[in-house]
Amino acid sequence: MKYAILGPQKGINRISETEPQSVGELATVAQITDEQAAQVESGRTSDPRVFYFLIDGALKTMAEKMAIAQAARLAGRAASMTPAERIKAAEAHIGAAFTSFLLMDGLKRIGEHKEAGTLAVIPKTIAVATWVEAVKQTALAGSVSFPPAPHTFEEVLSE
């Protein structure tokens, strides 16, 4: 076992073989495994450098820590929204990638290809239609953390 000296935001400032008797005023000490210590040290010498945070006993990168914080903010925001507000947020998310005209055109294309038995030739259009449904279901489930569109407008048009 080793010891991590953590800053106020739980960032690992350094690793110690023995338990430090005193650390800075805002610093704390946490016990970590040898494997975690090796991972932290490896990150510090890699290019680009990777800095770790100790969150609930697990190592997290800055990107992971930011994603956790963003998810918590979105969950808090969603909890304070009415179902209608969540649906409007979903519509805005979808509208940022595809206009309603383009979505209607895509649904028309799906219907035509379904009738002709040729759905396999429009996989991007099908993926976007599935994504739209996933965004709606996410909003109805009480979240505003929507998945990104699987394809761009240009990719779907070129299909």
Image (cartoon, helix red, strand yellow):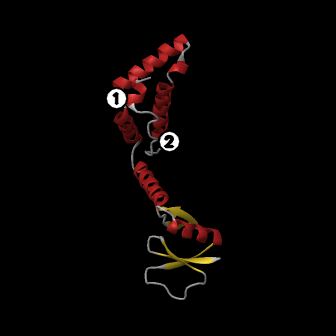
Q: Tell me if residue 35 comes above or below residue 96 in the rendering.
A: below
Secondary structure under the numbered disc 2 in the rendered image: loop
Task: Tell me the amino acid under the disc marked 1.
Answer: Thr
Residue lying farthest to the bottom in this orientation: 21
Residue highlighted by disc 2: 141
Residue 116 x, y percent position in the rendering: 53, 11
From the image, tell me which residue sits under label 1. Answer: 99
- Where is residue 54? Give x, y as percent: 53, 68
Vertical arrangement, residue 45 with respect to residue 156, above or below: below
Residue 117 position, x and y percent, is 56, 13
Q: Which quarter of the rendering shows the N terminus?
A: bottom right
- Say what amino acid the circle numbered 2 marks: Ala
Q: Earlier in the sequence, mark 2 or mark 1?
A: 1
- Say above or below: 11 vs 141: below
On screen, residue 112 versus residue 98, left or right, reads right
Quarter of the image holding residue 29? Answer: bottom right
The residue lying toward the viewer, choosing from 142 and 62, is 62
Q: Is residue 153 visible?
A: yes
As drawn, the residue found furthest toward the top would be: 116
Please tell me how crowded label 2 is: few (under 14), some (14-19), or many (20+) other residues with Cα within 10 Å: few
Is residue 85 rendered to the left or right of residue 123?
A: left
Inspect this view and state whether residue 53 appears.
Answer: no
Determine the residue positioned at 48% across, 13% down.
112
| Above-or-below relation of 133 to 111 | below
Number of residues whose C-alpha sits closer than 10 Å to that of mark 1, classed few (under 14), some (14–19) or many (20 or more) = some
Q: Residue at x 51, y 68 (%)?
A: 45
* Quadrant occupied by the C terminus: top left
Q: Nearer the viewer, mark 2 or mark 1?
A: 1
Residue in the picture at 58% in, 66% down:
39
